[in-house]
Amino acid sequence: MKTSLPAAPATPELTADGGRRLRAWSTISAILLLPATILAGILALTGENVSSCIAYNENCGTTPGWVYEGSLLITGIAWVVVLCPGHGAVRRTALWIQLGAQCTFLAAVLTIFW
């Protein structure tokens, strides 16, 4: 007796409207990263340790520089992946990776003086 396994459901491809929507969300979040960074920097400047960090280089945050550079690099690569034509699931995943990397960058900016 032969039994065949059911085929795995295929991931639906993006429609033209869905692809446009993904590109739009990705581009909007990339553009809004600059004002969000400025706002996070201003918010970070209101901390208690700012004056001693700026004046005496004491009580500064210990976040290494590669966190900033790496999160921005991942953001840029994920943004390009979302903009390029390809498989729908890959582009959706890249959008979530982009948003996660942007949140990591903003969290690092917020904690720069803590």
Image (cartoon, rainbow, N blue to C red):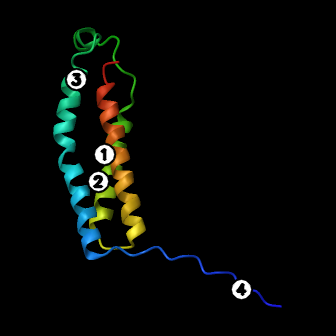
Secondary element type, mark 2: helix
Secondary element type, mark 4: loop
Q: Eyeballing the image, is 82 above or below 107?
A: below
Mark 2 to mark 3 CA distance (whole Å):
24 Å
Mark 1 to mark 3 CA distance (whole Å):
20 Å
The mark closer to the camera, 1 or 4, is 4
Mark 1 to mark 4 CA distance (whole Å):
47 Å
The mark closer to the camera, 1 or 3, is 3
Residue, disc 2: 76
Q: Are there few (<14), some (14-19), or many (20+) residues within 10 Å of tag 1?
A: some
Mark 3 is on which residue type?
Leu
In this rendered view, identify the residue nearer to me: 19 or 61: 19
Q: Eyeballing the image, is 17 above or below 102?
A: below
Q: Say which quarter of the image contains residue 53.
A: top left
Mark 4 is on which residue type?
Ser
Mark 2 is on which residue type?
Gly
Residue, disc 3: 43
Q: Are there few (<14), some (14-19), or many (20+) residues within 10 Å of tag 3?
A: few
Could you say which disc has been placed on residue 4 in the image? Answer: 4
Which quadrant holds the N terminus? bottom right
Q: Are marks 2 and 3 in contact (CB under 8 Å)?
A: no
Residue, disc 1: 72
Q: Are marks 1 and 2 in contact (CB under 8 Å)?
A: yes
The mark closer to the camera, 2 or 3, is 3
Sequence-earlier tag: 4 or 2: 4
Q: Residue at x 18, y 24 (%)?
A: 42
